[in-house]
Amino acid sequence: MEFQPVLLAGGVSRRLYPLTEATPKSLLPVGNRPLISYQLELLEKAGFKEAIVLSPESGSDKVQKFLKNTYKGSLATDLVVFDDLLSTTAALLKIKDKIRHDFILISGDLVVDPSFIHKILDLHRVQTATVTVLLQKQKETQSKPIKTRKLDFFGLDKSKNRLL
C-alpha cells in the first residue's frame, strides 16, 4: 500500500464521561464490540497489512491489552504511547521516524465502509493534494463549551477546495 495508516485510539472523552472514567473511548462497546475493533477491521478490509496505533498514556495499558489478548485480526499493530497533554500534531511528531511514506490518519471513532477509504485516497491522488481532510459541521448544543488546553488551527480555501 502506498499509504500508511495511523489510528488515533483516543483516551478520556469529556463528552462521554462518566463512560470513559475507567475505559478509554476507543474501547467503549458499540454493538457488543470495542469501538477500535471497527477501525482495525476497516483497515484490514481496505487492504492494509499494518497500522500505527497512537494512544494517550492514560488508557494505553488497556489498549495494549486489547491489541495483544483480544484482537484476532490480521493487521499488525504498533502501539505508540504519548503524554495525555500532547496535541494530535505533537503525537504525530513523536512518530515521525516511523512514517515511511504518505499516511492516512484515522480518528478512533470513525465507522465507515471500507470503500470510503479508497474513495478518499483516490480523491487525494487526483487532486495531487498535500493534505486531504474530512470535516463535519458539529451540531449546535446547549451545553457549555469545553475548555481546551491546546488547539490546532486550520483554514479552508473554498475557491481551491484546499486546507491551509
Image (cartoon, rainbow, N blue to C red):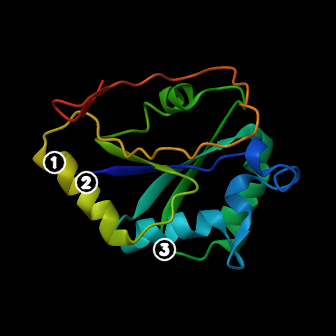
Q: Are marks 2 and 1 in contact (CB under 8 Å)?
A: yes
Report the disc number at residue 121. 2
Q: How many marks?
A: 3
Residue 97 vs residue 102, the one in the foreground: 102
In the image, taking residue 153 as reference, residue 68 lies left or right, namely: right
Residue 80 image offset from top left, x and y in percent:
60, 42
- Quadrant containing the C terminus is top left
Helix, strand or loop under label 1: helix
- The residue pinned by badge 1 equals 125
Nearest the viewer among 80 and 156 is 156
**Residue 32 point in image, percent of width and height:** 72, 79
Q: Residue at x 88, y 53 (%)?
A: 22
Tell me what residue is drawn at x 27 percent, y 55 percent: 120
Q: In front: 78, or 3?
A: 3
Return the disc, 3 or 1, that comes first in the chain's sequence: 3
Nearer to us: label 3 or label 1 = 1
Cα–Cα span, label 3 and label 1? 27 Å
> Is any part of residue 13 visible from this angle?
no
Q: Is residue 77 above or below residue 74?
A: above
Give the amino acid type for the residue marked by disc 3 in the picture: Ser
Q: Amino acid at mark 1?
A: Arg
Establish if 69 lies above or below 126: below
- 10 Å crowding of disc 1: few (<14), some (14-19), many (20+): few
Q: Which residue is mark 3?
A: 74
Q: Helix, strand, or loop for circle 3?
A: loop
Q: Nearer the viewer, mark 3 or mark 2?
A: 2
Q: Quadrant of residue 135?
A: top left
Choose top left, top right, bottom left or bottom right for residue 103. Answer: top left
State which quadrant residue 143 falls in: top right
